[in-house]
Amino acid sequence: QVQLVQSGGGLVQAGGSLRLSCAASGGAFNRYVMGWFRQAPGKEREFVAAISRSGGSTSYEDSVKGRFTISRDNAKNTVYLQMNSLKPEDTAVYYCAAEVQRMAVTTYPSEYDYWGQGTQVTVSS
């Protein structure tokens, strides 16, 4: 059973930065596509970023391109989301997720198999 434990997040002013971490255990981390999603109050969970098994391929939602960076350290079984130039509209609960069956990066939450516990990110104006 794969477990994902998130850390990071919190309250930051607009224009600030935060880094989220997601540590995996219970499986072969270097065989998982990893993704980050977010969910704001009253809205559906939406894709933020994803990274391939090796880290050689990434994908980003348009509104975070150039501001957010997803990365992974397979030796530490950890995926990161560096968030810069944060905006109030980035406020949401952020979730990491692992996709264990496919090889390609995917943006659909329904294709991910395991989820972290979620962490709140609040950006004040």
Image (tube, rainbow, N blue to C red):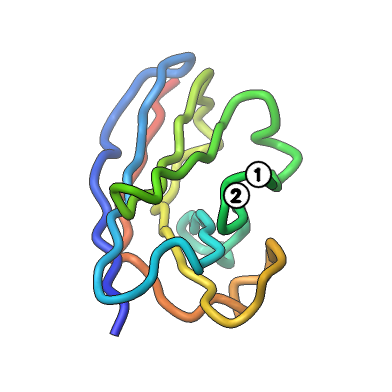
Residue at numbered disc 1: 56
Q: Residue 4's quadrant in the figure? A: bottom left
**Residue positioned 69% across, 44% down in the render:** 60
Amino acid, disc 2 = Val
Work out whether 36 lies above or below 81: below
> In this view of the protein, which residue sits in the foreground, 80 or 25?
25
Q: Count residues near mark 1 (Cα–Cα under 10 Å), then give few for <14, some for 14-19, many for 20+.
A: few
Q: Closer to the observer: label 1 or label 2?
A: 1
Work out whether 78 lies above or below 106: above
Say which element carries label 2. strand
User: In 3D space, how far apart are the residues under numbered discs 1 and 2 (Cα atoms)?
Assistant: 17 Å
Q: Position of residue 103 (x, y in %)?
A: 67, 70
**Residue positioned 45% across, 20% down in the render:** 125
Work out whether 74 lies above or below 19: below
> In this view of the protein, which residue sits in the foreground, 102 or 22?
102
**Image label count:** 2
Say which element carries label 1. loop
Residue at numbered disc 2: 48
> In this view of the protein, which residue sits in the foreground, 59 or 67?
59
Amino acid, disc 1 = Gly
In the rendered structure, the answer to whether residue 108 lies left or right of residue 78 reads right
Q: Position of residue 87 (x, y in %)?
A: 53, 26
Q: Residue 122's quadrant in the figure? A: top left
In the rendered structure, the answer to whether residue 109 lies left or right of residue 95 reads right
Which label's residue is closer to the chain start, 1 or 2?
2
**Residue positioned 50% across, 39% down in the render:** 71
Which residue is most to the right? 62
